[in-house]
Image: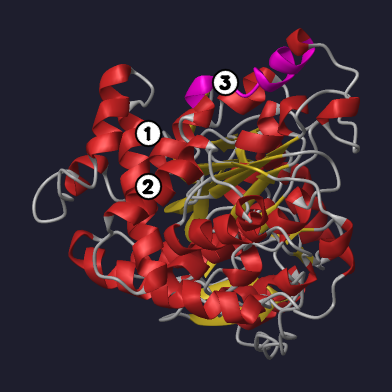
Amino acid sequence: MSYARVLCVGLVGVDGHLVEVEADLSPGLPAVVLTGLPDTALHEARDRVRAAVVNSGRSWPNRRITVNLRPATVPKQGSGFDLAIACALLAGAGELPVAPLEGVVVLGELGLDGAVRPVRGVLPMVAAAVRAGIRQVIVPLGNAREATVVPGVTVRGVDSLHRLVAYVRGEDRLLEPPPALPRPPAAGPDLAEVAGQELGRHAVEVAAAGGHHLALMGPPGAGKTMLAERLPSILPELDDAAALEVTALQSIAGVLPPDGGLIRRPPFQAPHHSASLAALVGGGPGLARPGALSLAHRGVLFLDECPEFANATLQALRQPLESGRVLLARARGTTEYPARVQLVLAANPCPCANPAGERFCACTALARRRYLAKLSGPLLDRIDIQIRIQPLSAAQLMTTTTPAEPSAVVAARVARARAAAAERWSAAGWRVNAEVPGPHLRRPPWRLPAADTAALRKGLDRGALSARGFDRILRLAWSIADLDGRDRPTGSDVHEAAQLRMGEAHDRRDED
């Protein structure tokens, strides 16, 4: 037999597609021709497979070998096709029977010694295979625990090409996936560690309840970073669908935890302000890789010192914040990644950022305006909550009589608020208030009484408020009502939402 076919899976973004690896051996000058839009790493599979086959004790066929990856119109990337190419080639040379591999997906990278190495993206690959009707997959032993997360498929691990050849010939058995490792309880920053900052704590709680974006302005040392880092601690755990999305993205990026289980905690990404556009949004050679924006999907993307980011990098966030997805167009094709995140921005009031306050600032008014102007109006218009954090007083910093609420207590209120929102919007498929389209809130039965929104409509008519801002204040009002246990917002909820939106909210100590 000079022709054989083995199944594999290719990825374009997070979407997998079944790939038929065809091998044809014909008379002619010895050569290996690889077709089907392979990238550079896949082109190099010819040399890896040749060395692995020889070092596994098998003879290399001295014939003209054509390997086709079908469908040939879809770009292929990565080294995960190595094992399937080796199996198809050996089967075409008559070294292996084809029947045991019928309807089985084979994934893995080959070392020159014949060892099977782990690859990125096994979880979305296996999920795509299951959707295509595959019920058995063979993956590298290092990826086997990860692959078992996908239900409805039998997973077998393999550590070498020699073992796989012996299994196909009926001389050996494949390896069972390692048992799941116990995941330690989540430990991280707690809101109880934040001194004072009642306004900041309240803003973080409202943001968590409704999935709203948040901007924290204030002098250094006031607690902006502490508040942002503790936002994930009050978010609910991810459900099965969201956990699978997040885990798949972590698998593609190669940063999946060693236990290989589903990631249940919302992710937190805090790239440095020197991060490039590709690092933040996604990119790279060939088909684009996910950036920090997609790795924070269903979690928090925190941009500390955000005016220090490149202007083009910040502006690239505008479209994903609206659509919840990143579309990366490259010469080799278009890649799409999910990016439903909560964006948290933190900024000092000026370049010098004197901790003593604005009275001791050495910056001119023009320098301060230029510094904050890096946060453009269209970007800030997409931020639901914008507040100014005040410096801590000595009494707030040193008090120990009334400890602040821990994250667990706040998380319970957030969970109740999210449950109320999910029940209210379940028929339309929305999870949190931030996902509800504005026109939906402006139509019966969800439209608020005219008296409660009169101030907002006046601001819209005067040009002090955009249409997007109008809708975002309505969403904030619903989140505030959910936290207080009311089924509909009141006029006071709308007023509070407007203050949080326009940066006019005050800390309670300022009112005393």
Which residue: 91% across, 27% down? Answer: 360
- Type of amino acid at the residue the image marks with label 2: His
**Within-10-Å neighbours for mark 1: few <14, some 14–19, many 20+:** many
Q: Position of residue 83 (x, y in %)?
A: 65, 60
SS category of the residue bearing label 1: helix
Q: Main secondary structure of the magenta part?
A: helix
Q: Position of residue 415 (x, y in %)?
A: 46, 76
Give the total of numbered labels: 3
Per the rendered image, the range of residues in magenta is 367-378
The residue carrying mark 1 is 469
Measured in 3D between alpha carbons, the distance from the residue under mark 3 to the one under mark 2, in whole angstroms, is 25 Å
> In this orientation, does residue 30 appear?
no
Q: Quadrant of residue 485?
A: bottom left
Q: Is residue 368 magenta?
A: yes
SS category of the residue bearing label 3: loop
The residue carrying mark 2 is 495
